[in-house]
Amino acid sequence: MGNTTKKSETGPEEKNNYFSELESLEVVDDKERLKRVDAVFRDKAAAAETIPLLYLKDVTEIAKLYDGQGVQLEDLIGEGNIALLMGAQSLDFCEDAREVEMFLTHTVMDAMEKLVADQNKESDIDSRIAEQVNRVYDAAKELSEALLRKVSIEELAAEMEEEVSVIEEAVRLSGNRIDFIQTTE
């Protein structure tokens, strides 16, 4: 499972293909599914091959619970599918098919919750960076207009009562695009 979240590159056609493939899977009621899980879950190879197919549709339904929380549905499904595959290989401690089902459901949900939390954390960091860059930009503009020239990082740091390193970092994060600051090139 990856910690890095990237924008999904899945187009509408690929999404429809995935959902079409899901629809083509054999429909198995809960009783039959538990019977099949019970038959294979102690055999690692058989479990890893059979069990994920029995729960793929569930992953999509679980993903819908987390949709709208900052992560695209396709990314949630992908993360859930990975967790399902990994979970199906880790059933040694399960005593019966019900425990397998509960374990897999929790594994998929945990993976999706972590993905949402990581994405939100990343968004918070991005917001703080943007705030800092904007604060430095605004202060540089104001001081530059008052002095009628570009200002040095040291002057801006003194004016803002900030460490020089904070100003340098903001300038770096802006791609050196704060026009009001004199930079050495």
Image: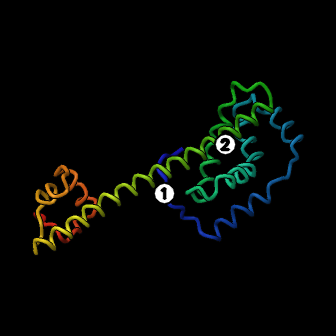
Dot 1 surroundings within 10 Å: few (below 14), some, or many (20 or more)?
few
Residue for badge 1: 6
Disc 2 marks a residue whose amino acid type is: Leu
Q: Residue 98 location, x and y as percent?
A: 80, 32
Disc 2 element: helix
Q: Are marks 1 and 2 in contact (CB under 8 Å)?
A: no
Q: Which residue: 77% across, 24% down?
A: 95
Q: Quadrant of the N terminus?
A: top right
> Left of 110 or right of it: where is 160?
left
Between residues 162 and 171, which one lies in front from this camera angle?
162
Q: Position of residue 73 (x, y in %)?
A: 63, 58
Report the residue at 61% width, 47% height from top. Answer: 112
Q: Earlier in the sequence, mark 1 or mark 2?
A: 1
Lateral position of residue 181 relative to residue 86, left or right = left
The residue singled out by tag 2 in the image is 84
Q: Position of residue 54 (x, y in %)?
A: 78, 45
Cα distance between the residues tagged 1 and 2: 20 Å
Q: Residue at x 56, y 50 (%)?
A: 116
Type of amino acid at the residue the image marks with label 1: Lys
Q: Nearer the viewer, residue 114 or 181?
A: 181
Q: Quadrant of the C terminus?
A: bottom left
Q: Nearer the viewer, mark 1 or mark 2?
A: 1
